[in-house]
Image (tube, rainbow, N blue to C red):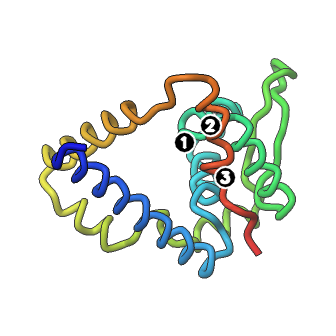
């Protein structure tokens, strides 16, 4: 591995490690994993999206999003409902308890990161976003066999 490539791999590993550490802290503080918190937020912000559309929006497989939604329903934080106009379409909405939990939950990212990021100039934030999106695209599994592993990798163990 070339030294620049190795530095990129180490930088990605650092991002993953810090994200994992924050996720563990988030779980201790709120009882929510990062994916569950992101799903709650996505449901609150996009009630017009189907479960599949929500999954795509937050970069989870449909199976993982469904599993997370199952847990949110079990904990009475969200509920599924069918479209009135097309019974095949299933949506989710937050319960009162879900809204309350979301309102009280910490940010899905460390607050010091958010503060530092928001202090950057708009073009710096845009450049970081563009680079991260490109890295994410480069890391996409290229075969269906690899993408079958995604639910295992992304779905965190059930909270306490």
Q: Position of residue 59 (x, y in %)?
A: 54, 39
Q: Is residue 112 above or below residue 63?
A: below
Q: Which residue is mark 2?
A: 54
> Secondary structure under badge 1?
loop
Which numbered disc, 3 or 2, marks the residue that appears first in the sequence?
2
Which numbered disc, 1 or 3, marks the residue that appears first in the sequence?
1
Q: Position of residue 66 (x, y in %)?
A: 76, 42
Q: Label 3 to label 2, Cα distance in Å?
A: 15 Å
Tell me the residue at 65%/36% (across/down): 61
Tell me the residue at 46%/32% (across/down): 140
Q: Label 2 to label 1, Cα distance in Å?
A: 6 Å
Foreground of the two, 59 or 13 = 13
Foreground of the two, 47 or 126 = 126
Q: Nearer the viewer, mark 1 or mark 3?
A: 3
Q: Nearer the viewer, mark 3 or mark 2?
A: 3
Residue 120 falls in image quadrant = bottom left
Residue 35 falls in image quadrant = bottom right
Residue lying farthest to the bottom in this orientation: 29
Q: Is residue 77 above or below residue 57?
A: below
Tag 3–tag 2 contact (CB < 8 Å): no
> Secondary structure under badge 2?
helix
Characterize the local packing of mark 2: few (<14), some (14-19) or many (20 or more) Cα atoms within 10 angstroms. Answer: many
Which image quarter is the N terminus in? top left
Tell me the residue at 77%/54% (across/down): 78
Q: Label 1 to label 3, Cα distance in Å?
A: 13 Å
* Direction from residue 43 to residue 127 in the image, left or right: left
Q: Which residue is mark 1?
A: 58
């Amino acid at each position: 591995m070339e030294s620049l490539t190795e530095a990129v791999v180490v930088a990605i590993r650092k991002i993953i490690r810090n994200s994992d550490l924050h996720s563990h802290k988030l779980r201790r503080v709120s009882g929510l994993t990062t994916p569950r918190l992101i799903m709650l937020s996505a449901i609150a912000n996009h009630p017009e999206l189907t479960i599949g559309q929500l999954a795509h929006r937050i970069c989870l497989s449909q199976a993982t999003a469904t599993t997370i939604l199952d847990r949110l329903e079990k904990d009475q934080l969200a509920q599924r409902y069918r479209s009135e106009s097309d019974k095949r379409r299933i949506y989710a909405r937050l319960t009162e308890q879900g809204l309350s939990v979301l309102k009280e939950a910490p940010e899905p990212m460390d607050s010091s990161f958010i503060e530092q990021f928001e202090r950057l100039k708009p073009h710096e934030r845009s450049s970081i976003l563009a680079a991260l999106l490109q890295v994410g695209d480069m890391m996409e599994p290229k075969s269906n066999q690899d993408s079958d592993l995604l639910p295992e990798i992304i779905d965190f163990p059930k909270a306490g």
